[in-house]
Amino acid sequence: MIFAVVAISVFLLDFFIKKQIEAYFESGGNQKICKGRVLLCKHHNYGAIFNRMERHPGLVKRFCGGFWLALGIMWLLLLRKRDNMALKLGLSLLLGGGGSNLYDRIARGYVVDYVSFRTPWKWLNRIVFNVSDLFILLGSILAAFGGK
């Protein structure tokens, strides 16, 4: 039950942040926080990671949906077992984050990204992501290294 709460919480957290970003930020507008090291902005990602495949949003949507469904089935099968807590937590984070981004793709036609870091490295400054992306990264690490 706790793993379902984790997945739903991740989904809802990012869902409500995206709703606020869409309502109160203009495209191209931004707000600096943390002494200018973090930038909040509104960016629409029509493709996959780093806007790859942006000219094929239908393909990206189907691939993400299929991948999310496969993870969900694996997650449901693992919930019956007592062990593999890190793997179950990782999959829960992946499902919550992936579900939020998949919802965006289906409902909006794009994923809302809104966070960027200001660093000395220009390539890193160009990356805009959302909270779901962070949970997907963390979930992937937990699933990869926490599974037996």
Image (spheres, rainbow, N blue to C red):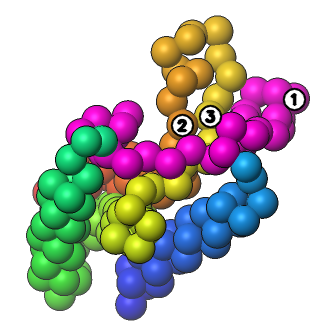
Question: What residue appears at the point 50 percent right and 48 percent down from the top-left corner?
Answer: 44
Residue at image location 64% in from the left, 69% down from the top: 19
- Give percent across and percent down for residue 117: 64, 29
- With respect to residue 79, does 85 lie above or below? above
Q: Which residues are magenta?
A: 27-53
Residue 90 circle label:
none
Precedes in sequence: disc 1 or disc 3: 1
Q: Residue at x 87, y 29 (%)?
A: 35
**Residue 126 placed where, x, y %?**
54, 24
Amino acid at the residue labelled 1: Lys
Left or right of 35, for residue 111: left
- Residue 68 is drawn in which quadrant? bottom left
Name the element at disc 3: strand
Residue carrying label 3: 116
Q: Position of residue 146 (x, y in %)?
A: 26, 53
The residue under label 1 is 35
Q: Which residue is mark 2?
A: 128
Q: Is residue 110 above or below residue 115?
A: below
Residue 33: in sight, yes or no? yes
Is 116 positioned to the left or the right of 84 in the image? right
Q: CA distance from mark 3 to mark 2?
A: 5 Å
Three-letter amino acid code at the position of disc 2: Val
**In magenta segment, residue 39:** yes
Q: Determine if the magenta segment contains residue 112.
A: no
Q: Tag 3: residue type? A: Ser
Residue furthest out toward the right: 35
Residue 6, image x, y percentages: 46, 76
How far, Cα to Cα, is label 2 from label 1?
A: 18 Å
